[in-house]
Structure formats: C-alpha cells, structure tokens
Image (cartoon, grey):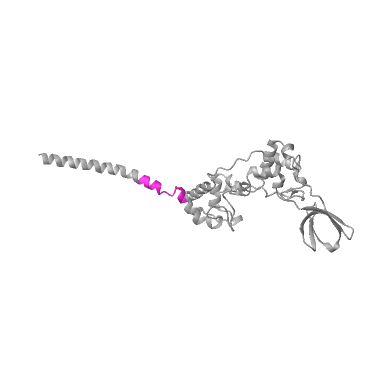
C-alpha cells in the first residue's frame, strides 16, 4: 500500500514539475528571443555596416562617396520618420539607393543605430528666428554689403551660403562676434590698366605674371601684370568687431539661426514627405 501511495505521489510531483517547466519555458524563450531579437542595437549596427558603411563609413562620418550623417546637425534635426523615408526611398539625386526591400523593421533599426552614433539623436536646439535673422543679414547687421548668400549680396567677403553647414551654433556665433575666427577674405586692390580703365575688387588669385580680380558685380577679371600701370593693395576692410555690442543677444541668435538654416536637409528632402 505504501509503495503504491509513494508511486502516486511521485507521479503527481512529476506532473507538477512538468507543468511548471512547460509554463516557464515560453518565458525563457521570450527572453532569449528578445535578447537575440533584431530589434537590439547590434542588429541596426549589422545592417548599417553591411548596407550603409560602404559610403558613409563605419562611424557614419562620411567617406569619398557620401557625407557625414553623424555630427552634421542638419541630419540630426530630421525626425526619425524623415530618416526612415530617406533610407527606404533613397536619394536618387545624390546617388543613394532605396533600401525599402530590407523591410520596415530593419529600416527602423538602422535609424536607431544612427541615433546612437549621433549620441542619442538629440540635435542641439538652435535658438532664434531665421526669418528675423535674414532681415538682420541684409539690414541692421549689413552682412550682405560684403557677403553673398543664395545669389544675394556682395562679393567682397566669402559666400556664406554653405558656411554654417554642420557647425554648432556656438561656433557660428563666435565667428560673428570674433571675426578673426571666421572665414578669410580676399585682398582688396585697385588695378589701373594702361588702357585707362580702373578696376577695383578682391584679388582671388595672383602669381608673378597675372592676377584675377572679382569686381563688386561678381565678374572675374583676368589681368596680365604687364598690362597694368599700377596695382594698389587697399587696407583690408575688416569684418566689424562690435557685433557683440551692436546686436542684442536675441538678434545674434536670429542671425545664427538664419545662417544655420540656409541649406537644411529638410529643404532638399521635402519631396520625400509625400511618398508612402
């Protein structure tokens, strides 16, 4: 009798252990599945390495065939959805192929990994109003009297259409308030030609025999030095050093925002917003 009872108890205990094991197994399987899931960052890294690194580099900081997409603040400012659309639909105008065939999950993983490379994907907030900044650029700040942007302005200073691409706001602001840190200008000069013509402009290229002057209307003039009666180098009109006083902190923010937003990725990618 005792032997039968013992066997019964053993069988009951075995069934309990079996049931417990069966109940626990799905949880363990789910944990293993989650740990090995393609949703983990390593999956995004694998996809990025195999699909993107050939052009953008393993660190995403660009190569010979594609730009830096990590530290470029214009790329950082794109939403995850915009980035997913770019990855899925490609950018034929820049030679980037579409990757929609890898599936929406892997597209999301690539974007998640890119955000990790960017340090979490949180782009630095650029304070200021770019519309007010443009008015300052052509008005109170008189930047357009020397600099040109998108075909507007003068040629005495560097064209600033792409100057701020990828630069942090503090760097742009410092270049405005501390002009010695900004882009260099050419040398102003007055060239008097033997024919009687006088040409004033910025020397863009010069050697022992010739020089190239860009006049305020943007035209380049190639001159042989043997044709010159005289060439007078003018004191370089420096970029104003009083912007920190002349402009308020808010106005500086507006000016920085204008320069920073001149050629944003959103502008050139807007066509992709209507794509599924």
Q: Return the x and y of residue 213 as percentages of the image width and height.
A: 79, 56
Q: Residue at x 56, y 46 (%)?
A: 82
Q: Is residue 251 left or right of residue 106?
A: right
Q: Residue at x 11, y 41 (%)?
A: 3
Q: Return the x and y of residue 168 as percentages of the image width and height.
A: 62, 45
Q: Residue at x 84, y 64 (%)?
A: 226
Of 195 and 233, which appears nearest the observer?
Answer: 233
Of 229 and 22, which appears nearest the observer?
Answer: 229
Q: Is residue 152 magenta?
A: no
User: Residue 93 is drawn in which quadrant?
Assistant: bottom right
Residue 276 visible in rendering: no
- Relative to 56, say whether 143 is above or below: above
Q: How many marks?
A: 0
Q: Is residue 73 left or right of residue 139?
A: left
Where does the magenta region start and end?
29-43
- Relative to 103, say whether 207 is above or below: below
Q: Return the x and y of residue 113 as percentages of the image width and height.
A: 50, 48
Q: Residue at x 11, y 39 (%)?
A: 2
Of 103 and 64, which appears nearest the observer?
Answer: 64
Residue 179 visible in rendering: yes
Name the outermost residue toward the left: 1
């Amino acid at each position: 009798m005792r032997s039968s009872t013992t066997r019964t108890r053993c069988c009951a205990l075995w069934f309990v252990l079996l049931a417990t094991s069966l109940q626990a197994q799905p949880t363990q399987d789910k944990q293993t599945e989650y740990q090995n899931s393609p949703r983990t960052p390593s999956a995004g890294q694998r996809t990025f390495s195999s699909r993107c690194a050939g052009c953008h580099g393993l660190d995403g900081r660009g190569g010979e065939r594609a730009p830096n997409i990590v530290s470029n603040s214009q790329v950082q400012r794109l939403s995850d959805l915009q980035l997913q659309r770019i990855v899925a639909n490609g950018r034929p105008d820049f030679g980037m192929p579409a990757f929609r065939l890898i599936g929406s999950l892997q597209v999301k993983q690539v974007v998640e990994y890119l955000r990790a490379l960017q340090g979490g994907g949180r782009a630095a907030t650029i304070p200021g109003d770019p519309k007010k900044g443009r008015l300052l650029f052509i008005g109170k700040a008189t930047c357009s009297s020397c600099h040109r942007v998108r075909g507007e302005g003068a040629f005495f200073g560097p064209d600033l259409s792409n100057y701020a691409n990828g630069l942090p706001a503090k760097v742009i602001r410092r270049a405005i308030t501390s002009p010695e840190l900004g882009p260099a200008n050419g040398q102003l000069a007055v060239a008097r030609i033997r024919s009687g013509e006088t040409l004033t402009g910025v020397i863009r290229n010069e050697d022992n025999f010739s020089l190239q002057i860009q006049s305020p209307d943007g035209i380049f003039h190639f001159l042989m030095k043997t044709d010159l009666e005289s060439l007078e180098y003018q004191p370089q009109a420096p970029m104003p050093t009083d912007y920190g006083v002349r402009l308020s902190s808010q106005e500086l923010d507006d000016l920085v925002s204008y320069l920073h937003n001149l050629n944003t990725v959103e502008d050139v990618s807007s066509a992709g917003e209507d794509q599924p």
